[in-house]
Amino acid sequence: QVQLVESGGGLVQAGGSLRLSCAASGLTISNYDMGWFRQPPGKQREVVAEISRSASIPLYADPVKGRFTISRDNGKNTVYLQMNSLKPEDTAVYYCAARRDISWQTWGQGTQVTVSS
């Protein structure tokens, strides 16, 4: 069974940090591009960051550039999102996803991140 399981979300004050993890099972992430997405309350899901299977230069959405870092540990079959200098507008459900070809076809169940002001 293919699964992506996110963890590490929670409640944090503005300016704080969180590290999200996405553990994969049933697939080998070294064969996939991996991404983090988020869905703020009442809004559509949006991309946060992605990293290719070759771990070349990661891509970040403008609102998180310089604050968030995506990384992958193929040996642990896990992807991470380090989030620093968190802002209330970062409050969202965060999802990880895997892409083998064109579309993001495998998704996790999401983890809630709430940033208080």
Image (spheres, helix red, strand yellow):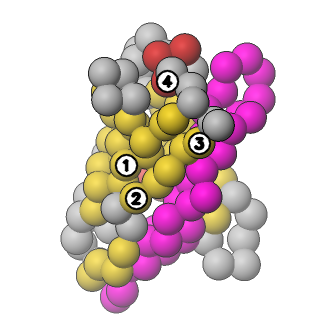
Q: Residue at x 31, y 21 (%)?
A: 75
Per the image, the residue denoted by label 4 is: 29
Front label number (2 vs 3): 3
Per the image, the residue denoted by label 3 is: 3
Figure check: 61 above or below 14 = above
Figure check: 2 above or below 117 = above
Specify the segment rendered in magenta: 90-117
Q: Give neighbour class at mark 4: few <14, some 14-19, many 20+ (Cα, 10 Å).
A: many
Q: Quadrant of the N terminus?
A: top right
Q: Is residue 65 visible?
A: no
Q: Is residue 92 visible?
A: yes
Q: Residue at x 72, y 71 (%)?
A: 43
Q: Residue furthest bottom?
A: 117
For label 3, the SS is strand
Q: Disc 1 residue type?
A: Ser
Residue 21 disc label: 1
Report how far apart the C-alphas of labels 4 and 3 lie in the structure: 11 Å
Image-based side of 88 in relation to 39, left or right: left
Going from the N terminus, do you reach mark 2 or mark 1 first?
Answer: 2
Nearer-the-camera pick, 57 or 3:
3
Report how far apart the C-alphas of labels 2 and 1 lie in the structure: 5 Å
Per the image, the residue denoted by label 2 is: 7
Looking at the rendered structure, the number of numbered marks drawn on it comes to: 4
Going from the N terminus, do you reach mark 1 or mark 4 first?
Answer: 1
For label 4, the SS is helix
Going from the N terminus, do you reach mark 1 or mark 3 first?
Answer: 3
Report how far apart the C-alphas of labels 1 and 4 lie in the structure: 13 Å
- Spot occupied by residue 112 in the image (x, y as percentages of width and height): 49, 71
Q: Disc 4 residue type?
A: Ile
